[in-house]
Image (cartoon, rainbow, N blue to C red):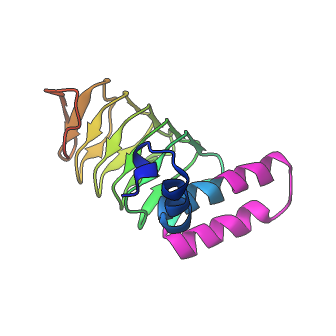
């Protein structure tokens, strides 16, 4: 991972992220889509969404809100639908679904959450800040801040430490 992705701000690190990071390209395309929607420019959002899906392998709905510093470690197979809200510095580890199972609402994911590979977060649930969602977990209920959710359906446990806990 480039130093800029972990907080360094020197020009070389930033250039490396801009030129080589899929995550940067995904968020840049998404910001362009948001601007096109805000300016009511017809078809631009749709064309950019199709390009984003075809080239990057990620589907982000037009009403999704992405926070600052959202990072897609592996973007392939990620689907974020409806009006889901994604907080700042959330990490997606790939092949994730953030959406609804019964058309009853979409998730809110707070800041500094890690979402393990293959995890599904479905319905009108809230994932608390600094929580970790384990690989292949299926989350159907709220997860309090500083928790770990694992299993199908996900069971929730408090985090044992507040440092970088591997998934």
Q: Residue at x 46, y 50 (%)?
A: 4
Which residue is at the far bottom? Answer: 54
Residue 78 in sight in this render: yes
Residue 68 position by quadrant: top right
Q: Position of residue 50 (x, y in %)?
A: 64, 70
Closest to the observer, 90 or 139: 90
Residue 98 in sight in this render: no
* 131 part of magenta stretch: no
Closest to the observer, 114 or 80: 114
Q: How many marks?
A: 0
Residue 124 position by quadrant: top left
Closest to the observer, 69 or 138: 69
Q: Position of residue 65 (x, y in %)?
A: 59, 41
Name above or below for residue 156 compared with residue 36.
above
For the N terminus, the image quarter is bottom left
* 44 part of magenta stretch: yes
Q: Residue at x 40, y 52 (%)?
A: 3
């Amino acid at each position: 991972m480039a130093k800029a992705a972990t907080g360094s701000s020197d020009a070389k690190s930033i250039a490396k992220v801009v030129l080589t990071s899929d995550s940067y390209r995904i968020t840049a395309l998404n910001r362009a889509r948001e601007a096109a929607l805000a300016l009511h420019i017809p078809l631009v959002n749709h064309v950019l969404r199709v390009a984003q899906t075809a080239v990057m392998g990620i589907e982000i709905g037009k009403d999704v809100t992405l926070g600052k510093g959202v990072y897609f470690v592996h973007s392939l197979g990620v689907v974020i639908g409806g009006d889901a809200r994604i907080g700042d510095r959330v990490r997606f580890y790939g092949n994730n679904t953030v959406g609804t199972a019964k058309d009853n609402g979409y998730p809110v994911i707070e800041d500094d959450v890690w979402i393990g590979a293959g995890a599904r977060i479905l319905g009108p649930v809230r994932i608390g800040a600094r929580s970790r969602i384990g690989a292949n977990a299926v989350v159907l209920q709220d997860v309090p801040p500083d928790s770990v959710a694992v299993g199908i359906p996900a069971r929730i446990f408090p985090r044992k430490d507040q440092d970088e806990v591997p998934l």
